[in-house]
């Protein structure tokens, strides 16, 4: 498997391939000029080429990070941490590198000098919310990745379709994800509001969309 990829690295990107954990480790640890996000689940490997991420994907990901930050700044009483593209592993079983991972509450993961830069999910807890932004990976985000995060028991999973200006919110219930119109973790966040924020971004820019979103949060607070 890995030999074929070494001959043509384009085979890696945006496609799941049969693999072993050892194949994953070899790719993870190989010196490479490529910046990749790695996923391993059910003996399948996916490497997404960060160097090939589009302007649309990048802009939408930063939009989501900023509006999540806005909500958190309105709730300073909540301990929180936002991570982007950080590799997380259950050794020998699963690996994920979500576009955005949000931790809320206690026991936030912390970098320890001299230890691996990866998050060890056998020691540290999983995020409370994972966000995947899709421009060319929507099918995988709604299928394999959704099952991967469900297997990890991540409480909430969002998929942001940047091209289609559509948001999908999934809540973990009874061992699987069920689609919801609103977030359980972040009151006020709905799939409709997130979709409108993407539309605002595509019509202008992500910063103007953040300002628009901030106004919506203010209006929501006034109404409540």
Image: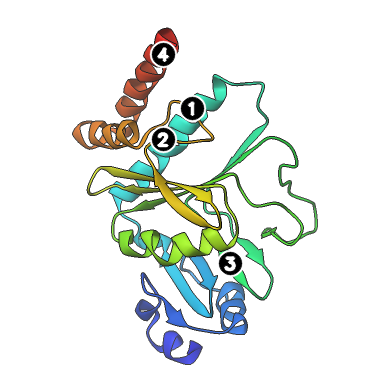
Nearer mark to the viewer, of 1 and 3: 1
**Left or right side of 48 for 117:** right
Tag on residue 187? Answer: 1
Query: Compared to 22, does 63 lie above or below?
Result: above
Contact between marks 1 and 2 (CB within 8 A): the answer is yes
SS at badge 3: strand
Label 2's element?
loop
Picture quadrant of residue 27 = bottom right
| 88 lies left or right of 59 | right
Which residue does the numbered mark 4 point to in the structure image? 218
- Please report the residue visible at 40 percent of the width from the left and 77 percent of the height from the top: 12
Mark found first going from the N terminus, 4 or 1: 1
Identity of the residue drawn at 79% across and 51% down: 112
Is 163 situated left or right of 21 in this image?
Answer: left
* Label located before the other in sequence (3 or 2): 3
Q: Is residue 36 visible?
A: no
To which residue does mark 3 refer?
95
Q: How far apart are marks 1 and 3 (CA)?
A: 29 Å
Q: How far across and how far down the image is residue 161, in percent?
A: 30, 49
Q: Which of marks 3 and 4 is nearer the N terminus?
A: 3
Crowdedness near tag 3: few (<14), some (14–19) or many (≥20) residues, C-alpha within 10 Å? many
């Amino acid at each position: 498997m890995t030999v074929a990829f070494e001959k043509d690295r384009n085979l890696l990107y945006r496609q799941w391939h049969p693999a072993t954990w050892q194949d994953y480790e070899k790719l993870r640890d190989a010196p490479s000029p490529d910046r990749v996000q790695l996923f391993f689940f059910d003996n399948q490997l996916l490497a997404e080429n960060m160097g090939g991420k589009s302007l649309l994907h990048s802009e939408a990901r930063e939009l989501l990070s900023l509006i999540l930050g806005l909500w958190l700044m309105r709730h300073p009483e909540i301990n929180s941490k936002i991570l982007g593209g950080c590799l997380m592993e259950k050794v020998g079983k699963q690996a994920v590198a979500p576009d955005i991972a949000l931790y809320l509450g206690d026991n936030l993961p912390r970098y320890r000098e001299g230890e691996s830069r990866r998050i060890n999910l056998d020691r540290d807890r999983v995020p409370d919310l994972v966000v995947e932004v899709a421009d060319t990976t929507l099918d995988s985000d709604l299928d394999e990745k959704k099952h991967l995060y469900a297997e990890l028991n991540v409480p909430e999973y969002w998929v942001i379709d940047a091209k289609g200006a559509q948001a999908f919110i999934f809540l973990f219930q009874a061992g699987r994800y069920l689609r919801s119109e609103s977030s359980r973790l972040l009151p006020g966040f709905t799939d409709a509001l997130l979709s409108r924020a993407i539309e605002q971004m595509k019509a202008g820019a992500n910063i103007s969309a953040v300002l628009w979103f901030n106004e919506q949060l203010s209006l929501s607070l006034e109404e409540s």
